[in-house]
């Protein structure tokens, strides 16, 4: 392995480490919240969460860690993987996603669903209970896909 490959491998490992950290904290928040309010959440459970400072903090942590995880993967990890694979990353993000799909790391459609949810979170959702419930339940559903992507990358770089 050349020096460049070692540097790119280290970047992938560093970004994987950061991503797994966010995933672990996301999972911990789901586990803590799920002990009292199992997922998927219904409106009654969500209203009880809003009444508890502790459980509200877990729901905020879920949203925060999901956003951080999606940002890390999209902004850093994916490009590092392609550099490690010897690919040019000076191209539109859609082309980067298509390359990752070609090596069975992601599904472009699934990534757009994840990204769209991240963009939805960026807007104020706190005054809309139905939207907040949907966001938390969708994150719960998508966390497995995020973990699968990370595991695929980990397997690729060894």
Image (cartoon, rainbow, N blue to C red):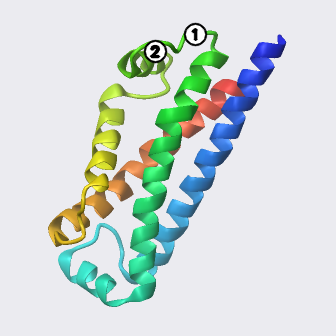
Quarter containing the N terminus: top right
Residue with the most extreme bottom position: 51
x and y percent of residue 155 in the render?
A: 65, 30
Q: Residues within 10 Å of mark 2 (few under 14, many from 20)?
A: some
Residue 87: numbered disc: 1
x and y percent of residue 79 in the render?
A: 55, 24
> In the structure shown, which secondary structural element does the residue marked by tag 2 occupy?
helix
| Label 1 or label 2, whichever comes before in sequence order | 1
Q: In this picture, is 147 found above or below 92?
A: below
Name the residue located 37 percent from the left edge and 49 percent from the top edge. 142
Which residue was labeled with disc 2? Answer: 99
Q: In this picture, is 9 found above or below 118?
A: above
Q: Is residue 1 visible?
A: no
> In the structure shown, which secondary structural element does the residue marked by tag 1 occupy?
loop
Q: Residues within 10 Å of mark 1 (few under 14, many from 20)?
A: few
Name the residue located 44 percent from the left edge and 18 percent from the top edge. 96
The residues tagged by marks 1 and 2 sit, at their Cα atoms, a distance apart of: 9 Å
x and y percent of residue 126 in the render?
A: 24, 70
Circle 1/circle 2 CB separation < 8 Å: yes
Tag nearer the camera, 1 or 2:
1
Name the residue located 52 percent from the left edge and 15 percent from the top edge. 89
Q: Quadrant of residue 98?
A: top left
């Amino acid at each position: 392995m050349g020096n460049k490959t070692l540097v790119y491998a280290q970047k992938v490992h560093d970004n994987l480490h950061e991503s797994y950290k966010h995933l672990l904290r996301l999972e911990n928040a789901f586990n803590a919240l799920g002990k009292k309010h199992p997922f998927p959440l219904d409106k009654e459970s969500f209203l009880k969460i809003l009444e508890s400072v502790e459980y509200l903090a877990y729901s905020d942590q879920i949203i925060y860690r999901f956003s951080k995880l999606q940002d890390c993967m999209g902004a850093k990890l994916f490009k590092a993987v392609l550099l490690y694979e010897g690919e040019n990353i000076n191209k539109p993000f859609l082309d980067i996603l298509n390359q990752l799909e070609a090596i069975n790391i992601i599904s472009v459609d699934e990534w757009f669903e994840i990204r769209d949810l991240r963009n939805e979170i960026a807007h104020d959702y706190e005054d809309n209970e139905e939207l907040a419930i949907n966001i938390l339940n969708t994150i719960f559903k998508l966390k497995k896909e995020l973990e699968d992507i990370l595991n695929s990358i980990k397997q690729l770089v060894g």
